[in-house]
Amino acid sequence: MIRQRIPWLPLILVGVSLLFLVLSETGALSPLERSLSYIVGPIERTLASISDTLGNLTQTSRDIRDLQQQIEELEHANNTLVQENIRLLEYEAENAQLRQQLNFARENPTHSLLGADVIERGCEIYPCASVIGNDTNPYLHYLIINAGSRDEVAVGMPVVTGGSVMVGRIAQVSPNLAYVQLLNDPQIQVAAMLQQSRVTGMVEGTADGGLLMTDILPDEQVNEGETIITSAAGGLLPRGLILGQVATVSYQESELFQQAVVRPAIDFRRLETVLIITNFPTPNLDEFLENEEE
């Protein structure tokens, strides 16, 4: 016959629990509870503090991730705005140039005009000898534009930019390109006059890339700051294209003429677009020969 074991442990635990409950209700355990509270209380506060700290760290880490995401979004938005602002500034600059060219066309309805972009500049930073090889003149200035003989561009045509400012003349053409000799090339001479006093002379380039107005009669009054324009003498250029302003005037008795240093009206290094005057009204000087033959 097998004896069944009685489960004493649960009974003991139940009895001890009842004993503690009775002692607690009677207040017999109060001193013990106070003693335990002195021990357990700091531990509970420490554990609570650790729990709060861990919770704060978790929240801080979450906040840092959110801030990083916001910063990335703001940086992307800022980069987009910067790029858009650059595009708008470029459009504004292009529109300003086009408005100047349009105004020139409106003010000169008798001229035939062709627009072109500057695609190459020469002799501004490096000597031309190192740029075009065979030309040994270190101060020859030129531009290359994207219009040529297919666009009816021909040698000798004047080239201008916004505001009726003369840039130079077409010196060489290919089917799609043209070589523009700038106004400050020493090989160019332009018949000119002072806009206010109507004093005449010739504007030509100098070896160092500057401009001079020469052949001014010694008894003429030339004032600093006067605007110099083309005079149309010879019929090679239209009248009124701006060449620059008088910077200084000099005269020596041993010389036959006065000369003036000219301040250019444009910075040739900053040209982006130009207009070629392909046709303009010119007087027919052959009429005299025709009359003589008759």
Image (cartoon, grey):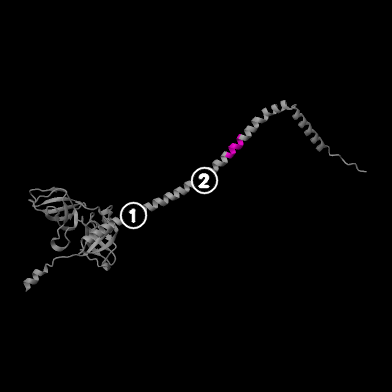
Residue 53: within the magenta?
A: yes
Dot 1: few (<14), some (14–19), or many (≥20) neighbours within 10 Å?
few
Dividing the image into 4 quarters, which one contains the N terminus? top right
Q: Quadrant of residue 286?
A: bottom left
Residue 116: x percent and y percent? 28, 61
Say which mark, if any, is on residue 261.
none
- Cα separation, mark 1 vs mark 2, equals 36 Å
Quarter of the image with the C terminus is: bottom left
Q: Which residue is mark 1?
A: 90
Q: Position of residue 293 (x, y in %)?
A: 7, 73
Q: Which residue is mark 2?
A: 66
Main SS of the magenta segment?
Answer: helix
Q: Nearer the viewer, residue 133 or 278?
A: 278
Which residue corresponds to the image point at 55% horizontal and 44% vertical from the top-left?
A: 62
Magenta stretch bounds: 49-55
Kind of element beneath mark 2 = helix
Asked whether residue 265 is drawn in magenta, I would say: no
In this rendered view, identify the residue nearer to me: 68 or 268: 68
Which of the marked residues, 1 or 2, is nearer the chain's N terminus?
2
